[in-house]
């Protein structure tokens, strides 16, 4: 069954009305604002590498990521800044087009809005700083998960919701 051919109703994941697109763009905007606000605080109060111990497994620490997820390509010569910026802009355009086409699908729209807000939040960093500001540092028994930020969290939540949406769509199609 094609994405646009979804049956109405289902598990309450549908929504009708033309305001859906604005709702999802509004959610993406809130994510961008929250992401940028937290990053402004981190840049304003911490120097690179400085941090605060919050719990035995969590620190707030200022880190810079010139690469992608998990610092992929962080050691490249600088071209990755513009590559990931361009990739983010293209992804944002595709996501907005998909949101416009499927704004009434609640879980799918929520997932795309999260990914959109996160992608734009990180693109803003790349344009302003040349790197992404990360600050959430989880660790346990000497192992540190790579530091991340609000935008990364939104992208992860969005990706998980996209997987759930597809799982539910396939399940309904049986």
Image: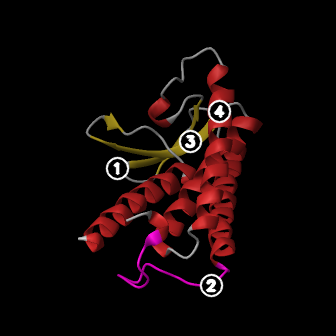
Q: Which residues are magenta?
A: 5-19
Neighbourhood count class around disc 1 (C-alpha, 10 Å): few under 14, some 14–19, many 20 upward = few
Q: Earlier in the sequence, mark 4 or mark 1?
A: 1
Query: Residue, x 34% and y 68% (percent of image)?
Result: 169
Inspect the magenta stretch and tell me whether residue 120 lies in it.
Answer: no
Residue to which mark 2 is pinned:
17
Give the image location of residue 75, x and y in percent: 54, 18
In this rendering, the label closer to the viewer, 4 or 1: 4
Q: CA–CA distance between discs 4 and 3?
A: 9 Å
Characterize the magenta stretch by its predominant secondary structure: loop
Q: CA–CA distance between discs 2 and 1?
A: 47 Å
Q: CA–CA distance between discs 1 and 3?
A: 19 Å
Q: Earlier in the sequence, mark 2 or mark 3?
A: 2
> Which label was assigned to residue 134?
3
Residue to which mark 4 is pinned:
131
Q: Is residue 1 left or right of residue 82?
A: left
Q: CA–CA distance between discs 2 and 4?
A: 39 Å
Give the image location of residue 99, x and y in percent: 60, 64
Q: Is residue 85 left or right of residue 104?
A: right
Residue 52's place in the image compared with 117, above or below, is above
Residue to which mark 1 is pinned:
56
* Kind of element beneath mark 1: loop
Q: Is residue 91 left or right of residue 53?
A: right
């Amino acid at each position: 069954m094609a994405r646009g051919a979804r049956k109405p109703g289902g598990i309450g994941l549908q929504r009708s009305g033309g305001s859906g697109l604005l709702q999802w763009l509004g959610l993406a905007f809130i994510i961008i604002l929250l992401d940028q606000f937290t990053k402004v605080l981190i840049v304003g109060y911490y120097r690179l590498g400085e941090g605060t111990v919050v719990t035995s497994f969590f620190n707030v620490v200022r880190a810079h990521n010139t690469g992608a997820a998990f610092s992929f390509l962080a050691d490249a010569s600088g071209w990755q800044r513009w590559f990931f910026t361009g990739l983010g802009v293209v992804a944002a355009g595709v996501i907005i087009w998909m949101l416009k086409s499927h704004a009434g699908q609640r879980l799918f729209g929520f997932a795309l809005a999260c990914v959109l807000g996160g992608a734009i939040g990180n693109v803003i960093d790349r344009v302003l700083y040349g790197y992404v500001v990360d600050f959430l540092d989880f660790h346990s028994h000497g192992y540190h998960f790579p530091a991340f930020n609000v935008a990364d969290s939104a992208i992860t939540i969005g990706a998980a919701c996209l997987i759930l949406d597809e799982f539910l769509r396939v399940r309904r199609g049986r």
